[in-house]
Amino acid sequence: MAQASVPGECGREQVVEQMFRVLIGIVGVMIAVLIVVLVRKDRLHVRHAFGWLTVAVGFAFLGVAPEVTDFLAYHLGIAYPPVLALTLAIVVLVVKLLLMDIEGSRIAMRNQRLTQRVAMLEADIRRTQAEIADK
């Protein structure tokens, strides 16, 4: 038995899809503006801003041209194109986490070395003060 089609259902799906595209594009533009504002206010280092701007451009691009994901998924043999987008998002997040861990480790090592240098300088100061007091 054939399934009855609801009048206007196809048009409604297209409107929802178009609204979703616009929303994703707006999110990308908003993220890009936020990143620029954060860099200008010295809340985000320029070195980190480049990666986040890439993410924002990706959002905006997918909002404007989601067919690119469909095209790439088809040629990569992925049956459901959103899986490609989600996989890429997970990869980006994992790389970002790795870079954050590397940066955190670098900062921790630098802090440890600076603490050691301060301790050595304080010891030198105490030794110099003791020598002056003995004279």
Image (cartoon, rainbow, N blue to C red):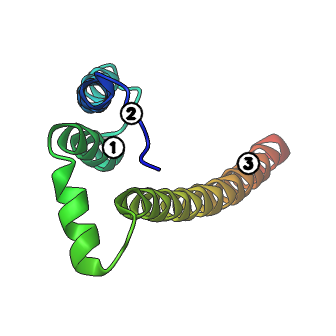
Vertical relation: 22 (above or below) 105? above
Which residue: 23% across, 45% down?
A: 62
The amino acid type of the residue labelled 3 equals Glu
Q: Mark 1 or 3 closer to N-term?
A: 1
Q: Are marks 3 and 2 in contact (CB under 8 Å)?
A: no
* Local crowd size for mark 1, using a 10 Å CA cut-off: few (<14), some (14–19), many (≥20): some
* Local crowd size for mark 2, using a 10 Å CA cut-off: few (<14), some (14–19), many (≥20): some
Q: Which residue is mark 3?
A: 122
3D distance between C-alphas at marks 1 and 2: 10 Å
Between disc 1 and disc 3, the foreground one is 1
Which residue: 39% across, 64% down?
A: 80
Element marked by disc 1: helix
Which residue: 61% across, 63% down?
A: 105
Q: Which mark is residue 26?
A: none
The amino acid type of the residue labelled 1 equals Trp
Q: Are marks 1 and 2 in contact (CB under 8 Å)?
A: yes
3D distance between C-alphas at marks 3 and 2: 34 Å
Element marked by disc 3: helix
Residue that extends furthest to the front in the rendered view of this protein: 1
Q: Which residue is mark 1?
A: 52
Q: Which residue is mark 2?
A: 44
State the image coordinates of residue 84 (x, y, percent, origin top left): 38, 64
Which residue: 35% across, 39% down?
A: 45
State the image coordinates of residue 35 (x, y, percent, origin top left): 31, 29
Q: Mark 1 or 2 closer to N-term?
A: 2
The amino acid type of the residue labelled 2 equals Leu
Q: Are marks 1 and 3 in contact (CB under 8 Å)?
A: no
Q: Mark 3 or 2 closer to N-term?
A: 2
What is the total number of numbered labels drawn onto the structure image? 3
Compare residues 9 and 33 and report the one nearer the observer.
9
